[in-house]
């Protein structure tokens, strides 16, 4: 069994909870509250600001040029393709790029990115791949499943662009490269090393669920808690 198959089996119950989450379902059938989506987009944008550093650290810790090249490609695509989606939605919401970038992070958002960045700064390239894989693979799985089970979701006048982006071949190719990387990383490793990678993969899978749940409820939190204002400096 490939190592990615073992990981996928292990997180299946967690990932199915993401597919069943009302935020994800609402994206697919178009019933999602626009305020919840706006809250999510702002949080996700600053999440990606932090997350891109995972790919930069991956390029820095790569053991060969091909791997460095792929991580720099992931960095570039996130900054210029994925985050463009957020900037376009922000424009539709009447939010400037500056306002978007200065969103105050929720504690869930901070906990997630700080955990990943701790893994990245202190760990190996394989550990970085295990940490980022549930994001790239999980989003692609969500986009692809929505597009497949409900093709109308691709044409939705508001959420269609989201579904199109995450079910796209571009994202599929990036996720597949990372899946191949973790498979090669797993080959010939002792069980104790595989268990470390598996634990990281499980942790960020749980954080992915928590991010959806935060996105769904966060816009309704009391103003003092939701911290959805803006700061002038990044942190
Ligand atoms: C909380 C959260 N998790 C995952 C993604 C998706 N994502 C992050 S990086 C990447 C790969 C290339 O850009 C993908 C698909 C997101 N936006 N927000």
Image (tube, rainbow, N blue to C red):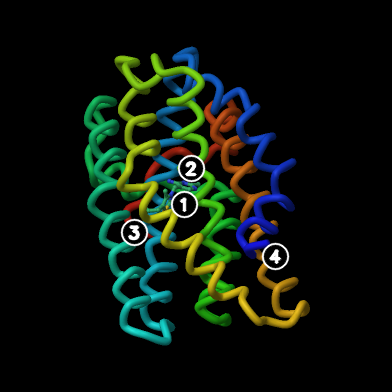
3 or 2: tag closer to the N-terminus: 2
**Residues tagged 1 and 4 counted as in contact (Cβ below 8 A):** no
Q: Nearer the viewer, residue 160 or 87?
A: 160
> Residue 135: in sight, yes or no?
yes
Circle 3 residue: 233
**Where does the image place residue 8, in percent across and percent down from the top left?**
65, 51
**Residues tagged 3 and 2 counted as in contact (Cβ below 8 A):** no
**Residues tagged 4 and 2 counted as in contact (Cβ below 8 A):** no
Residue 4 got which mark? none
**Where does the image place residue 176, in percent across and percent down from the top left?**
44, 55
**Where does the image place residue 183, in percent across and percent down from the top left?**
56, 67
- Is residue 101 rendered to the left or right of residue 141? left
**Where does the image place residue 179, in percent across and percent down from the top left?**
50, 60
Residue 198 got which mark? 4
Secondary structure beneath disc 2? helix
3 or 4: tag closer to the N-terminus: 4
3 or 1: tag closer to the N-terminus: 1
| 46 up-or-down from 151: above or below | below
């Amino acid at each position: 069994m490939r190592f990615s198959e073992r990981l996928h089996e292990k997180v299946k119950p967690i990932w199915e909870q993401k597919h069943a989450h009302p935020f994800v379902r609402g994206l697919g059938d178009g019933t999602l509250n626009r305020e919840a989506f706006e809250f999510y987009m702002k949080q996700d944008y600053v999440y990606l600001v932090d997350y891109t550093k995972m790919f930069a650290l991956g390029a820095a810790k790569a053991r060969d040029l091909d791997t460095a090249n792929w991580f720099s490609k992931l960095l570039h695509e996130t900054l210029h393709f994925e985050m463009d989606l957020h900037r376009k939605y922000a424009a539709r919401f009447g939010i400037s790029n500056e306002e978007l970038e200065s969103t105050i992070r929720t504690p869930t958002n901070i906990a997630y990115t700080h955990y990943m960045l701790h893994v990245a700064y202190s760990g190996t390239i394989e550990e970085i791949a295990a940490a980022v894989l549930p994001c790239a693979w999980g989003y692609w799985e969500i986009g692809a499943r929505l597009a497949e089970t409900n093709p109308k979701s691709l044409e939705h006048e508001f959420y269609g662009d989201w579904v199109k982006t995450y079910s796209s071949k571009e994202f599929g190719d990036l996720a597949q490269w990372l899946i191949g990387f973790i498979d090669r990383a797993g080959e010939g490793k002792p069980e104790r090393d595989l268990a470390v990678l598996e634990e990281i993969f499980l942790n960020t899978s749980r954080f992915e669920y928590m991010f959806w749940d935060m996105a769904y409820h966060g816009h309704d939190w009391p103003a003092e808690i939701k911290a959805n204002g803006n700061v002038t400096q990044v942190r």
